[in-house]
Image (cartoon, coloured by chain):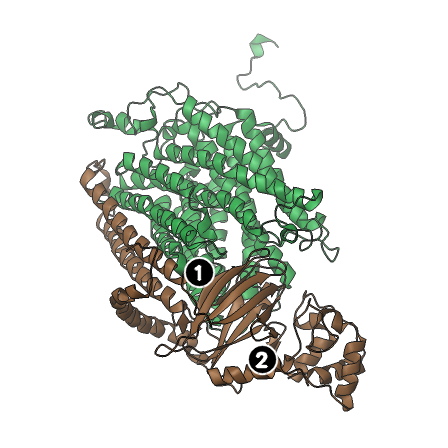
Chain colours: A green, B brown
Amino acid sequence: MNPDTFDPNFKIPAPERIGDERGSLTRLVQEMVFTVDHKRLGLMYIGSGLLFFVIAGIMAAMIRIQLAVPRNDFLEPDVFNRLFTMHGTAMVFLVGMPIIFGFANYLVPLMIGARDMAFPRLNAFGFWVFFFSGLLLYFSYLGAPGLYAAGSAPDVGWFAYSPLTAKAFSRGHSTDYWTLSLLMGGIGSLVTSINIIVTTLCLRCKGMILGRMPLFVWLFLVVAFLVIIAIPPLSACQIMLILDRYFGAKFFDTQAGGSAVLWQHFFWIFGHPEVYILILPGFAIASEVIPVFSRKPIFGYPVMVAASVMIAFISLGVWAHHMFSVGMTSIGNTFFAISTLLVAIPTGIKIFNWIGTMYGGKLRFELPMLFCIGFLFQFLIAGLTGVMLAIAPFDWQLTDSYFVVAHFHYVLIGGLLFTIFAGIYYWYPKALGKMPDFRLGLCHFILFTVGFHITFFPQHIAGFLGMPRRIYTYDTGRGWDAWNLISTIGVIFQAAGILFFVVNLIYSYIWGKKAGDDPWDAWSLEWSTTSPPPSYNFETIPEVRSRRPLWDLKHPDDPDWKYE
Amino acid sequence: MSPLSGGSDTRGEVNIFRAIAGAVRKGGSLVLAWALAAQAPAQSTDGGIMRPVADMFQPLSRPAEMIHESAVLVLMITAAIFVVVTAMLVFVVWKFRRKGPEDDREEPPQIYGSTHIELAWTVIPILITFVLILVTSRTIGEIQNAKMPEDALKIRLVGHQWWWEVHYPDLGIITANEIHVPVSTRTGKPRPTEIILESADVIHSFWVPQLAGKTDLVPNKRNRTWIEPFATGTFFGNCAEYCGTQHANMLIRVIVEEPADFDKWAANMQRAPGVPAEGLAAQGHRDFYGNSCVSCHRVDGTVAEGVFGPDLTKLMTRQTIGAGVAPLTPENLRAWVRDPQSLKTGCLMPDMKLLDSEVDSITAYLLTLK
């Protein structure tokens, strides 16, 4: 090149290889497949979780349409049974778990001032194992020839009580798809949890002692330990079930002296901690959002940590409260009723401390805060109905009725999903660099909240009137008609809310305002780096002296470390 | 006294609960009234008062009444907590909202916690929990460890996919899907019924909300529950544990009768059915025993000794067919004999591909089983 004709705008032409230009689809796929970056994996977890959420949500809508009126013939009984099985399994294992792991992946390293997770490639492995376990489960619709040799998904319910899963009662391979999918997904959950624990314990930046970690990180540390304790019993009983079905083992074969109740013990030793695995991340998000939008530090940080650890600990000893009606002794029932009631104490402390955090603050009702206030109200109801269910005699009436359906949807939607929405709106500017649109978000919040209550509150009453779970139809005249119709009408509002949410995610990404590094004027480390953060997260590894490092920077005259 | 021991001598203590329970029940009934208005109990000819709305807050039997007592207490406590905490939340959200841009100039006072306040809201929940633990423990003991009188009526209930097999071992009666029991009395000699629960295949659950809470029917395990109804009528219930395709249509009815009526019913059940001498029914009798009906069904005193399907000995004494899927009318019975799958998709009785004439004759024969 002649130096005299130097063109200052000259660029070296990019090599012409397929998929090299930024933003192309092949490039995107290539980056997703090869990435070991915790942020990208985090977003992939959340994205695929939301994808499965929409699928499982449509299944729920079909369930509600079938139940809208008595003796409806919208769905065949087998189709209905497959729908609620797949809806439940997907919502727990393909929506709840990946989304919370997505949040952990994205945020834990940023919050503790690390450059990545401790084991980045294991992290990618965990994601792909989860993702393919989800595909495997849904492939059962095509790949598991059922009784009529048509496509057939599992129809044994998400807790798949034996002996309904035995060869005699579950022909074909649908149950095997369910078993293998959960076994596989369990491996992904285990490695991800090990990764979270090692990252939290080993990669904290200078000054970030355990007592200065954001509550978010604390809660995910607790969750990760719970996963490690809870998943092995689940995997064990899946393996026992495979042995029963194909190798002539007799663990759950009641005709040959096996025990049907054994499955329930194994399943709920996993299943109850699982409930806390799902709700503690909700607490984690609320514990970040509420202080920032109240402009105050979290009220009683040490107590919040202690309460979380206590909830996790007690949750390991309450599993048989799912089994009050299987005919345990009165001593057994009493033990599990007492241990379950004890959970109310630390949970109550948490709710009070969140309210205490808001007390005396200057509350800013941005989208994340709106969803967190909704969470507080709904989780209060969920907690109180939980107390009712803990009273074993009352549970003999309520268990396996629509009251339970209402209760755990208040926990998992009113509690977890609302905080997930709060978290998505809160960290959206950090992850994508654009602000979520407030008006669209407000429509989402109002429609979804209204729809949620219309759908699930009447189910409490249907339960009081003796309506059992998992029935594909019912007769008129039993007092359930009105409640079911109202419940189905609520779905329209929820679906509209979700539509606004999806539109908002896309609209704001394209047309949203630029966010800047710290749009909410927050205090934890992730807001000190750019939005979105570079792949190495921080130019220099930060050093912290308190629980709110950015508060110290913004208020050098009155830093937190003086008081802690 | 230990909370586990329970017993009838402690019943006086809960009078205050019972009084408030009554008030709450009235209030609750008002709330539910509009939904239930169209479903007032209707008089029927054989089952007495029909009680299709299985409202657990209108118990008409022990132990449902004992459950109801503790349930109302818990509802009151949780309602109080709900009101207090919601009021706190609304107050805080309203009082401390951002009033305008001037609020952004200065941060509010930074408060990190308060040992006293946190101690208070730890101790109060502990006390409430303690009360709940005592109530729960006692009710569990009272219900589970209740002693049945020696002469209590005994029933053995066996769950099948998707129907109920009912045995009265002391009376030598076998029937299906509908249980008859005598009404008890609060003043005279109590007449509770003890129910032994078993399953022939998968797990089912016996649940008639106005009589008792649920107890599962678990294969290879023998469970037990009891009822002591204080009102007559037909009580509705469901299988409450998911048990496969037709879980929704595994309904159960408990028909509570005056002791004299119950004895009359039992006496009729113990008589073997007659053999129709002539006409369509006689042809049906031949067709019934000539086809494979007898492989699965039982008719007392005949060669029909099948155990896979419901006992048909006194079929026409029952109110419904197919474990509650339809009322037992001649038309529905005929439809069932023609093709059970048309009424109850996926049920284990196949379409027997009978000729039209066989359908008519077998239906006619079945109509004589009463």
- Amino acid at dot 2: Gln
Is residue A148 at least partly visible in the picture? yes
* Residue in the foreground of this view, choosing between B104 and A424: A424
Query: In the figure, is residue B236 to the left or right of B167?
Result: left
Label 2, secondary structure: give it.
Answer: loop
Q: How far, Cα to Cα, is label 1 from label 2?
A: 27 Å
* Residue in the foreground of this view, choosing between A561 and A324: A324
- Disc 2: host chain: B
At which x and y percent is residue B97? 25, 48
Per the image, the residue denoted by label 2 is B319
- Amino acid at dot 1: Trp
At which x and y percent is residue B21? 30, 68
Instruction: Tell how many labels.
Output: 2
Q: Residue at x 36, y 52 (%)?
A: A383
Q: Quadrant of the N terminus of chain B?
A: bottom left
State the residue lying farthest toward the front.
B150
Is there one chain holding both mark 1 and mark 2?
no
Q: Residue at x 45, y 70 (%)?
A: B150
Label 1, secondary structure: give it.
Answer: helix
Q: Which mark is residue A396?
A: 1
At which x and y percent is residue B41? 45, 81
